[in-house]
Image: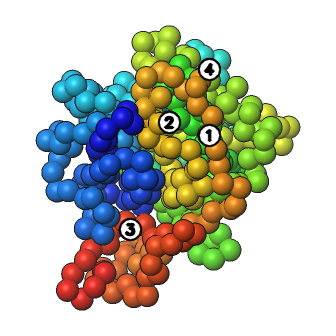
Amino acid sequence: MHNGTVRVCVVGSGGREAALADVLGRDATEVLVSPGNPLIEGSVDIPPEDLDADLFVIGPEAPLVDGLADRLRAEGQLVFGPGVDGAQLEGSKAYMKGLLAEAGVPTARYGTFTEAAPARAFLDTMAPPFVIKTDGLAAGKGVLVTDDLAEARNTVDDYLSGRAFGDAGQTLVIEEGLVGSEVSVFAVCDGRRGVLLSPAQDFKRIGDGDTGPNTGGMGAYSPAPVVTPDVHARAMREIILPTVRGMEKDGIPFTGFLYAGLMIDPKGQIKTLEFNCRMGDPETQPILMRLKSDLLDVLAAAIDGKLDQIELQWDRRTALGVVMAAHGYPEAPRKGDAINGLPQDADDAMVFHAGTVLDEAGVL
Ligand code: AMP
Ligand code: GLY
């Protein structure tokens, strides 16, 4: 892909996509970001289906679950990101749990329900903590973890009636609550193999000292010492590889970023909490700042099914990303405040925009 000019299109508009665009821009001739943001270089207000590029990289889960990768491939474009079937790994917990059971990948005991009576009967066989999830995407809010059986029962009713999350909740998954320490592991997959990215840890609570309500993530650093080399290697061997092989066997080769949310229990056993069919945001930002290899080559090798020829090189220094959010975030972010004093990008410091606008008053 490197001979001649290479135009890449990154789909999305957040900090993750800004970082992807920046790092891909080191080796691509041109990077477009659709829709991007006026402060992300290369942003174009043109839908990806109307663009022509040598490679499309889709950042967020929504367009993946919605089949954008399939639509682009049908037009003959090269795409890094799973099609609608592969995106089910994130888009349907029921699919994900079924695949893991079939592939023998460790995860919490579970049941899938569309009716209240069997769901309540299953709950009665479980011990707290009770975990109830919507089958479909619910903007990260469709998971209840509680020790209170009455709350669990009420939640079952709210989800199944469609009151809580509409259609996304009308199939639900009830699972055993796992305890231990939660870590995330990221890989680039080529349909049959995966290459691990250097680990990162994000922090989701809004307040200093890891306090207050959850957000999409207030910051992240890489590498993350909680993901020891042993945990990292076992996550690949015990979780990621068997999952990717299981999907290949089902005729759903997974080409894209795979994000595994894992729980390590006090005995050291690793179980799968969740999969995402995309990179984490804000983990992408510090991880990619440390990548010394050519990301364009890596993604092209994944699309060609040749990840066995790739070995990633990392900067040994630690990268730290901090999210500067608007006052009132996450419940009621205040809009329109000017952002002053943003530093210039430098070799060792970058600013990535998400949800910002540029107007005559400056950056808002
Ligand atoms: P999910 O959307 O499946 O990632 O779940 C969101 C969060 O809920 C996870 O990051 C965990 O903190 C928590 N969670 C999910 N499943 C379980 C489980 N089986 N046991 C304990 N906590 C869980
Ligand atoms: N940082 C968590 C996520 O991207 O889902």
**Mark found first going from the N terminus, 1 or 4:** 4
Q: Mark 3–mark 4 contact, CB under 8 Å?
A: no
Task: Give the camera-side residue of 257 and 146.
Answer: 257
CA gap, disc 4 and disc 2: 21 Å
Q: CA distance from mark 2 to mark 1?
A: 8 Å
- Is residue 206 shown left or right of residue 159? right
Q: Earlier in the sequence, mark 3 or mark 2?
A: 2
Residue under circle 4?
242
Name the kind of residue labelled 3 in the image.
His
- Residue depicted at 54% across the width and 26% down the height: 307
Could you tell me residue 89's position as x and y percent?
46, 30
Q: Which residue is mark 1?
A: 312
User: Is disc 2 in contact with disc 1, using a CB cutoff of under 8 Å?
Assistant: yes
- Whether residue 32 is visible, yes or no, is yes
Residue situated furthest right in the rendering: 267
Circle 2 packing at 10 Å, graded few (<14), some (14-19), many (20+), is: many
In the image, which is nearer the foreground, mark 1 or mark 4?
1
Tell me which amino acid carries mark 4. Answer: Pro
Disc 1 versus disc 4: distance between alpha carbons?
21 Å
Mark 1: amino acid: Leu
